[in-house]
Image (cartoon, rainbow, N blue to C red):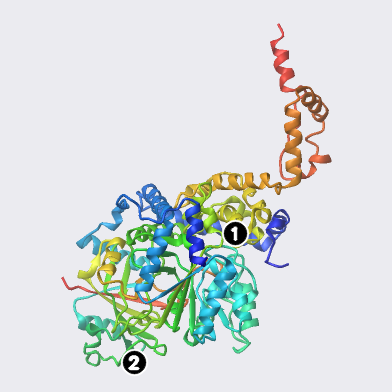
């Protein structure tokens, strides 16, 4: 059973996930962890609503003038002594990073957690190009050892148990005593620390993502709880930060706003343990820091999302609150979606980068209950954007065929009252029975038997004098 | 066309503007928790440091601070002291501590001095510089962080403004508690990559 799923197979993936007992047990933690932590963290913030409105406005302002702010950011990074590269696509971004590494004579690369590098699939080509690439976020390291994609935006190994990790560490760390005890979490974390510390100290290049790019100063902001971004961006002699173009914030005050909402929305933390700002490589006389600093700005479908119908998706700060409050995500987990970004934000974002033909199931995997929107720190209208993608899917004829046929039949019948009445009369005694054409639909839905007469017939009956 | 030109053109096609907004940037609301001053700020900072699972210690002077460090650091091993002038010049030997100046991956305990602190979040703020290695806050198992009470700021906006006033050092670190990971079974474990233990020592300079 592979963790790499195809989004085209979403219905089958969900059935597999629902039947996966260990996964179902893991998913129970969403409610007791993320949801309660977030709620508790918002208690001391009576201004929450106005802060969410302000963050949405700040991101909208940045997006409305994005070319200006990107150029301002670029100018300031260069003024700080760094370099800026632009990539239209995943393959361009990969080629840029590989070229930087080759030209700097790099052999060993450490990576801090970054969803964008998952989106563009950076690791495999770099390894093919001959570089050692090691993920250093504990969750990312675990799934790298297992060759799995992340199943959650901020908790990549969310789907795994301690026993899975023990097994992976035993298989990978063959240089350590095979009789050592690593059955508890504490010793697993200690072992990862020890193994990865050596990697940090030996690496020539550190790759990080970016939580925000601040235009007015040419600054990259990174947040982690482990300290992996800091060791990745400080010790190696080259630091490459790779970021989506939508990560721009005009000013430092906008960053203060984003930071207030990011940690609380994500993990219920007032502030992530490490929040770090990189403005250029080490300055003359600095005690440490990288000798060279590069920023790779990646489009990969984002400029197309700038259209009015989908622009708000680009407000996303990747906190994962929408996943944590989504009844669909809580039922099937992240892998079933078969894309980099699972849950509501993925349903709104992923069609732009993977195409609606491959991803049309995802915006349909929602009851439109709207919990995702109600917790989104940037007030992204997720259901409206999912509806947009549903329409696009239907328009392109890629939506699920039986549904499309059923709707067409219904539309035809509804426009022909006599045919409609006849069809209803025929179907009334049978429609709730769990076999026949409705069997599949009935499997997860209740269908009470229809009353004896039709609605129209009963109204007519009552009207009779 | 270069990738840069292409991306900027695609954004413009979809309605984004290449000139700055005409009106001044609207100020974002500052929540009440980010406006505390003096005794209130200190009380909030102390409470949040403890909540972040760091240890909170008050020291009336440098010597008291060194004694607190000596009492907690592993015995018979030198302590890595960040080369910041204010702490590198202290009489560590007089406090019974073998000081090794500089950040070190080989020593379990390290000391560095924060440039400021934030009451809103219970964070320490460090600026990189000639005598201020970033790694001094990340390599040790036990990190002793000194901070002057007079440098505690109300909120994040003040801290970011201070970083700008210092012309954006190449690295600015906000540190809020010891390193941790919840990546295994969503259960918190301390000491993922950075310090397992953080001891915040406030020099009560007023």
* Subunit under mark 1: A
Can you say whether A179 is above or below A144 in the image? below
Q: Is residue A62 above or below residue B166?
A: above
- Which quadrant of the figure contains the C terminus of chain B? bottom left
Q: Which residue is mark 1?
A: A353
Residue A161 lies, in percent from the top left, at 61, 69
What's the residue at 63%, 44% (across, down)? A391
Q: Is residue A448 above or below residue A215?
A: above
* Residue under pointer 2: B78
Report the side of B166 relative to A310 (left or right). Answer: left
Mark 1–mark 2 CB contact (< 8 Å): no
Q: What's the mark number on residue A362?
A: none
Residue B181 place in picture, x, y as percent: 49, 71
User: Residue at horizontal 64%, vertical 49%?
Assistant: A365
- Label 1 vs label 2, nearer the camera: 1
Chain under label 2?
B
**Residue B130: quarter of image:** bottom left
Residue A179: horizontal and vertical position, in percent? 62, 87
Q: Which quadrant would residue B170 be assigned to in this image? A: bottom left
> In the image shown, does B18 or A272 lie closer to the viewer?
B18
Q: Is residue B126 visible?
A: yes
- Comparing A424 with B147, the one in front is A424
């Amino acid at each position: 059973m592979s963790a790499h799923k195809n989004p085209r197979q979403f219905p089958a993936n969900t059935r597999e996930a629902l039947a996966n007992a260990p996964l179902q047990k893991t998913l129970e933690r969403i409610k007791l962890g993320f949801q309660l932590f977030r709620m508790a963290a918002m208690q001391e913030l009576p201004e929450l609503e106005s802060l969410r409105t302000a963050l949405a406005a700040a991101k909208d302002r940045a997006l409305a003038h994005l070319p200006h702010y990107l150029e301002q950011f670029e100018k300031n990074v260069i003024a700080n002594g760094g370099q800026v590269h632009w990539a239209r696509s995943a393959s361009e971004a990969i080629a840029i990073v590989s070229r930087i590494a080759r030209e700097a004579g790099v052999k060993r690369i450490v990576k801090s957690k970054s969803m964008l590098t998952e989106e563009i699939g950076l690791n495999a080509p770099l390894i093919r190009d001959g570089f050692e690439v090691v993920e250093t976020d504990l969750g990312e390291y675990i799934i790298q050892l297992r060759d799995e994609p992340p199943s959650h935006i901020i908790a990549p190994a969310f789907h795994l148990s301690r026993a899975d990790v023990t097994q992976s560490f035993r298989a990978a760390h063959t240089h350590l005593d095979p009789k050592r005890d690593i059955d508890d979490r504490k010793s697993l974390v200690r072992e990862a620390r020890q193994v990865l510390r050596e990697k940090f100290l030996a690496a020539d290049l550190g790759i990080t993502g970016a939580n925000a790019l601040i235009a007015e100063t040419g600054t990259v902001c990174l947040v982690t709880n482990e300290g992996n971004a800091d060791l990745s961006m400080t010790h190696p002699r080259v630091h490459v930060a790779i970021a989506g173009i939508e990560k721009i914030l005009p000013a430092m005050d906008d960053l203060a706003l984003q930071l207030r909402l990011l940690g609380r929305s994500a993990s219920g933390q007032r502030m992530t343990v490490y929040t770090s700002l990189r403005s250029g490589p080490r300055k003359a006389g600095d005690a440490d820091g990288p000798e060279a600093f590069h920023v790779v700005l990646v489009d990969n479908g984002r400029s197309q999302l700038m259209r009015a119908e989908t622009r708000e998706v680009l407000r996303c700060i990747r906190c994962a609150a929408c996943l944590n409050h989504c009844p669909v995500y809580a039922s099937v987990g992240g892998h079933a979606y078969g894309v980099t970004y699972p849950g509501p934000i993925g349903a709104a974002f992923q069609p732009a980068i993977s195409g609606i033909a491959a991803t049309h199931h995802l915006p349909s995997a929602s009851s439109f209950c709207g919990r995702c929107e109600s917790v989104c720190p940037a007030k992204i209208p997720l259901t409206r954007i999912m509806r947009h993608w549903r329409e696009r899917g239907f328009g392109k004829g890629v939506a699920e065929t039986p549904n499309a046929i059923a709707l067409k039949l219904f539309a035809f019948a509804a426009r022909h009252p006599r045919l409609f009445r006849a069809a209803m009369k025929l179907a009334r005694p049978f429609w709730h029975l769990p076999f026949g054409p409705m069997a599949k639909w009935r499997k997860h839905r209740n269908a009470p038997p229809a009353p004896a007469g039709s609605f129209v017939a009963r109204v007519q009956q009552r009207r009779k004098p | 066309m270069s990738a840069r030109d292409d991306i900027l053109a695609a954004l413009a096609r979809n309605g984004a503007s290449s000139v700055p907004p005409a009106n001044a940037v609207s100020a974002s609301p500052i929540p009440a928790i980010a406006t505390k001053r003096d005794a209130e700020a200190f009380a909030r900072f102390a409470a949040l440091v403890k909540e972040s699972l760091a240890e909170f210690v008050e020291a009336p002077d440098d010597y008291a601070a060194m004694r607190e460090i000596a009492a907690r650091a592993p015995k018979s091993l030198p302590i890595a002291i960040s080369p910041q002038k204010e702490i590198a010049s202290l009489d560590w030997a007089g406090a019974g501590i073998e000081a090794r100046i500089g950040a070190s991956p080989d020593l379990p305990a390290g000391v560095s001095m924060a440039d400021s602190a934030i009451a809103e979040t219970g964070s320490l703020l460090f600026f990189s510089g000639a005598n201020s290695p970033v790694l001094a806050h990340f390599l040790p198992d036990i990190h002793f962080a000194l901070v002057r009470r007079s440098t505690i700021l109300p909120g994040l906006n003040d801290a970011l403004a201070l970083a700008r006033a210092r012309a954006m050092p190449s690295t600015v670190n906000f540190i809020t508690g010891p390193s941790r990971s919840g990546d295994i079974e969503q259960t918190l474990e301390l000491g993922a990559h950075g310090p397992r233990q953080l001891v915040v020592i406030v020099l009560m300079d007023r």
